[in-house]
Amino acid sequence: MRYFPLFADLRGRRVLVVGGGEVAERKVRLLLEAGARIEVVAHALVAHELSAWAGDRPSPIFPPAGEGRGEGCVSWLARDFDESQLDGATLVVAATSDAAVNERVASAARARHLLCNVVDDAERSSFIVPAIVDRSPLVIAISSGGVAPVLARLARERIEVLFDESFGVLARLLADWRGRIKRALPDVGARRRFYERVVRGRVAELVRSRQPHAAGQEIERQLALPSQPATGSVVIVGAGPGDPGLLTLNALRALQEADVILHDRLVSGAVLGLARRDAERISVGKAAGAHSVPQSRIHELLVEHALAGRRVVRLKGGDPFVFGRGGEELEVLAQHGIPFEVVPGITAAIGCAGYAGIPLTHRDHAQSVRFVTAHCGESVDTLDWASLAQPRQTVALYMGVAALGRIAERLLAHGREAATPVAIVENGTRPDQRVTLTTLAALDDVARRGAVQSPALLIVGEVAALAAQLHWFGDAPRPWEALRSAA
Ligand code: SAH
């Protein structure tokens, strides 16, 4: 290890910062948060905030040390750097744009055995400042020793995702409760198990759902009944249409915390690949027309696993509340008093349209968009075709593959023009995405030739034609008429 990691207590301590520009300002901001007494040496404070922190005038005398707690303070010396300014400093930062000045600061600090950071110059520095994820009091510091800042940034981005803002709130809550927890559970082992349960379980969920008061009550409840089994819970997660890049950060976190994942057949392998390795995966695959696991059995499984104290993720294609029966599943959970969260997902219409280059609304072509399901004869018959056939709107049809012919026939019968463009997006957002461009008039022909397979989304409206020009993902769209005449 080239650098020794440490967290320094700088409250009330003098830190000398040489330089008055933005680079200095960035360092001063962090030092202020750590409660340091900062002395800035610079002829002018160019950076806006820095000059605001220091006040308008140079202040050659340090303000009183204060209690050495909380916010730090800044004073400004408007002169050249000289060695005597290092007297009594704990740390030194050289942040000027003049390499010779930085070098003078660094060597003067070295001579006095003071740690000095020369910003963006690891060679001249005797300490470097890590990238951080600040969820105070939880702070995660990352360093590549100055040799691969890109990797350090990547690591930081990933950690940012895993530890969202709520971790800071959770850490502060635990700090508040620390004394009481220690008194209630004097045994170290019991206390550790209790904390494990708190940070992985219901308390953390309540903090994430922005219910800090209820989270405190839950800690209290669990303290009163320390041997009670853990409360299970369900996160109902929208997995999006396939591309794992379309998952939300919340979905990713839920997948990485899950004990059990109940997933639909439509959920792509790439998405499942992001789940915690040792999570149990249960396919409750549903193909149109062939329900391999009946909905009532899915309800039973959800309840069983949650009541056994597990963190269950119910993973659904697209968005759980758009033709996903998510509402029914939540009703069952509510009846059993099982806590739940919902993570919305990108629904197929949004995903497929985006990846096919079809803007669902467009000032010239469509002022509204409708999401409609047409999965069986019955649902086709109950739709309001007169309103669906109105011009200047886009209709996105889910589960329509088996009913293509009937859909076209109804729309035509209710006055939609025969030349209205239609796009059929199969396996949208996935590597094997295929887009077929046709018209309402030809849709029946497409259906009779069995040219498209589920899962496919139908987009009816003038905007569909824009795919020919705006496609960007995978193969170019196939124009049906050209395909037919070539055959
Ligand atoms: N809750 C889901 C929809 C479930 S209904 C959502 O919000 O997207 C299943 C239908 O969604 C399929 O029959 C198909 O019409 C559509 N669908 C889902 N994923 C798709 C994909 N990757 N490409 C095309 N259509 C898709």
Image (cartoon, rainbow, N blue to C red):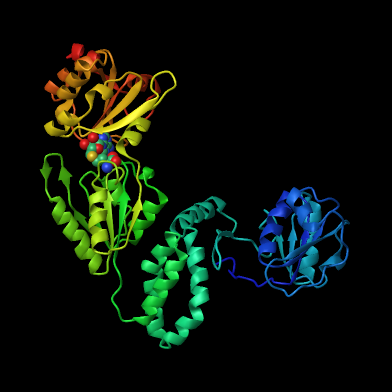
Q: Residue at x 19, y 64 (%)?
A: 304
Q: Residue at x 84, y 50 (%)?
A: 44
Q: Give x and y (percent) for residue 371.
A: 29, 33
The answer to which of 365 and 157 lies nearer the viewer is 365
Q: Quadrant of the N terminus?
A: bottom right
| Above or below, comparing residue 404 to residue 256 in the picture | above
Q: Residue at x 20, y 46 (%)?
A: 265
Left or right of 23 on screen, residue 194: left
Q: Quadrant of the C terminus?
A: top left
| Above or below, comparing residue 352 to residue 158 in the picture | above
Give the quadrant of ligand 1.
top left
Q: Give x and y (percent) for residue 288.
A: 15, 39
Whether residue 357 is visible here, answered yes or no, is no
Q: Give x and y (percent) for residue 227.
A: 31, 81
The answer to which of 390 and 149 lies nearer the viewer is 390
Q: Give x and y (percent) for residue 248.
A: 39, 48
Q: Residue at x 17, y 55 (%)?
A: 298
Whether residue 302 is visible here, answered yes or no, is yes
The answer to which of 279 and 184 lies nearer the viewer is 184
Q: Residue furthest bottom?
A: 186
| Above or below, comparing residue 224 to residue 347 in the picture | below
Left or right of 394 on screen, residue 118: right
| Above or below, comparing residue 396 to residue 68 in the picture | above
| Quadrant of the image occupied by residue 306 | bottom left
How many discs mark residues in the rendered view? 0
| Quadrant of the image occupied by residue 310 | bottom left
